[in-house]
Amino acid sequence: MSKTSSRPKRKATGGRYIPYRKKKLHEIAREPTLTKLGELKRKILRGKGSNKKLISLSNNIINLYDPKSKKYKKVKIKTIIETPSNRHFVRRNIITKGTIVDTEIGKAKITNRPGQEGTLNGVLI
């Protein structure tokens, strides 16, 4: 059974929609990437129209923005402290947008989607 981004089978009231066609290729969705904390591993995926998408499978270096000095630095990540999307991701070392990580400089918040963009960007807290 493939995941799709088509309309749901049920209405907001709980009633069923009558299916008028099957799933289409352009509606098929991917499994989530679940970027882990570790040595840099990337993967190139073919997107629509032969575009290439670089996804990050694992990463341990973050492009960190310091709001006081208004400069960027490449910093190594020590550990993951908190993840708002799923509390079990901390134990599994999975990095998503909004994750708070402990770096060599201090705590930082991830501001991008590493499974979609292939890099880690963050802001110093």
Image (tube, grey):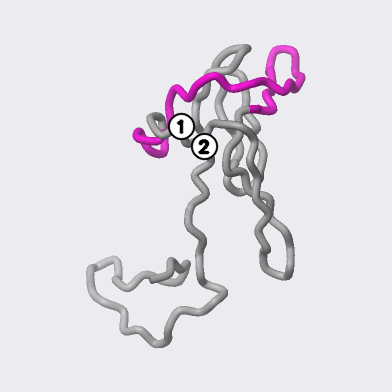
Kind of element beneath mark 2: strand
Query: Does the segment drawn in magenta span residue 63?
Result: yes
- The rendered magenta stretch, by its main secondary structure, is classed as strand
User: Residue 5: x percent and y percent?
Assistant: 47, 67
The C terminus, quarter of image = top right
Give the residue drawn at x 54%, y 19%: 78
Q: Nearer the viewer, residue 108 or 39?
A: 39
How many marks are shown on the rendered structure? 2
Q: Is residue 115 highlighted in magenta?
A: no
Numbered badge on residue 36: 2
- Mark 1 touching mark 2, by CB under 8 A? yes
User: Where 24 falls versus 73 (above or below)?
Assistant: below
Q: Is residue 23 left or right of residue 50?
A: left
Q: Which mark is residue 93?
A: 1
The N terminus appears in which quarter of the rendering?
bottom left
Q: Please name the amino acid that badge 2 sits on.
A: Lys
Determine the residue positioned at 61% across, 32% down. 39
Q: Residues within 10 Å of mark 1 (few under 14, many from 20)?
A: some
Q: Secondary structure at mark 1?
A: loop
Residue range of the region highlighted in magenta in the rendering: 61-89
